[in-house]
Image (cartoon, rainbow, N blue to C red):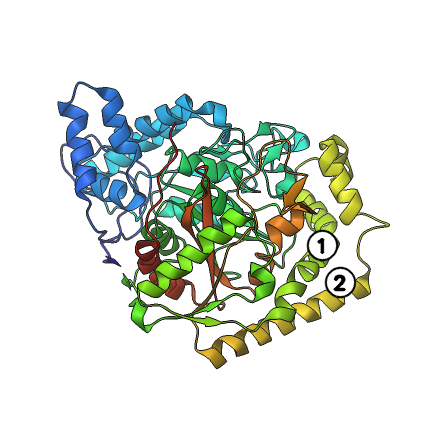
Amino acid sequence: MAVDGAGLPRTSPGCRCGKACDCAGASTTMSPSASLEPKDTAVAAADALSSRPNRAAVRQDLIDLTAVAAVTAMRNGDLKAEDYARALLDRARHLESLNAFRTLDEEMVLEAARDADKVRACGDAIGLLHGLPIPVKDSIDSKALPTSNGTAALRDFRPAADAGVLKSLFAQGGILMGKTNLHELSYGWTSSNAIFGPVRNPYDPTRVPGGSSGGSGAAVAARMAPLALAEDTLGSIRVPAAMCGLAGLRPSFGRYPGDGIMPLTDAFDQPGPLARSVADLALFDAAATGDRAPLTAAALQDVRIGIAPASLLSGLDSEVERVTTEAFHRLRAAGVTLVEAELPEIATAAIGTAMTIISYEAMPAIAAFLEAQGAGVTFEQLLQQASEDIRGAFATNALPPNRPSRDAYESALAQRQRMRGETRRHFEQHGILALAFPPIMIPAPRIGEEAQITIHGQRVPLHIAMARNTSLASCASMASLVLPAGMTSNGLPVGLEFDALMGNDRAVLALGLSLERALGAIAGPVL
């Protein structure tokens, strides 16, 4: 499989075609597009829109489309952007009890979709994401909708500018679908938000979807959209991907623009996508970076993958352990060479290093961001209005007298640099492309019970269960891909993470195109 790129002539905004068309009102400048692989399902769904009387069945066809298939159909004129947007909005409205969205302006989305249809009717160049509604995590600045970061003090805050990564998506024809709910201040792994309500897992609404980008994960898993924009500090893309049965990419540090996102730490925060296929992650990557070079699936018989050290495979929930073992068997059967990794010390030290850096940087980073954004609220005022659990978490970890010392912080930064070097040496020594392991130790816990994690009869702190395994990639600035690996006996998704060296994003995406076939698809949620 390949995701191809072929530039088209750039045109000016508005109607320049000189035809008797209805595109005079269009005012969006589209960038050069890519020739995407067509999907028969997209054309079938579009045909059904005009020929079938059963509208519910039509919408099911449309909401099941991947981003690649939907954009291809809209590019080719087989599907109107407005019809597609209506189908997704209907789905979101039908499943609003999942609490995936914080804000959703249906008329704004439909107007943007109509503009996309006018651009195509005019014959103007069409972007890589033409007509695609994209849910956006509510920590990422948007001019059109408030950006609350899940906290009361910013409930109505409207930034003056869109975040850089959002500008990149808009330039390629993407549409802001809405802002998704999240763990308050992105400071947690469950998305149980005491201010705006908990996000619910589409596979079991009594359980969490993971966090902090839980709304983005729930929206994609529930077929409200095929692709969403999220953000990852210490697992905030990877944890929802694992718990919601999705593909997720935490890119190499700095691969996508990071401005306009409320920080926890400049050392780790990275925007990235959640989707239901690796091809859709690759589409997002091309749109965000401008790299339209063909991406071809890796030949698995030529791939060496390191199995994570025992320290990242120990203490797993028995169902996670079973699914992981079976996934490794499938990879071997597909021709992948799996080798034992030898990173025990830095693997176990990563979470302590990461937590020290985050705890030291969070308070000044947030305070500086609020001032620079003109949010009209100080860090102290923001925290006063925050929920009790968030105030407690900050007091325990990131505020005096518990905030790490300067010496501890500098020691953690030095350790982070050593981790980068040791990881690279290990990869080169063993000739491996990626390191594989389950990103989290447990399946999705029940809402309200997530603070009391028990594995094999032993209490495990939540941050250990959720972030022990994800921390190394954050510390070493790696490119991390999470894929569905299987299901527990009671129908909950389990993910598998593949970490590649910094800068190898396209290589890990090419690997993912093959790995998702080798691992096999999992069933979607029944909603």
Above or below for 308 versus 18 = below
Residue at image mark 1: 361
Question: Identity of the amino acid at label 1?
Answer: Glu
- Residue 409's label in the rendered image is 2
Answer with left or right where residue 169 lies relative to residue 7: right
Horizontally, is 159 left or right of 458 in the view? left
**Mark 2 crowd level (few <14, some 14–19, many ≥20, 10 Å Cα):** many
| Residue 248: assigned label | none
Image height of 434 relative to 495, above or below: below
Q: Dot 2 lies on which element?
A: helix
Residue at 28% x, 46% y is 68
- Residue 4 visible to the viewer: no
Residue 303 locus on image (x, y percent)? 36, 71
Measured as percent of width and height from the top left, residue 175 is found at 38, 38
Given the current orientation, which residue lies at the most extreme top position?
53
Question: Can you name the residue that lies furthest to the bottom here?
Answer: 429
What amino acid is at disc 2?
Tyr
* Residue 169 visible within the image: yes
Circles 2 and 1: CB distance less than 8 Å?
yes
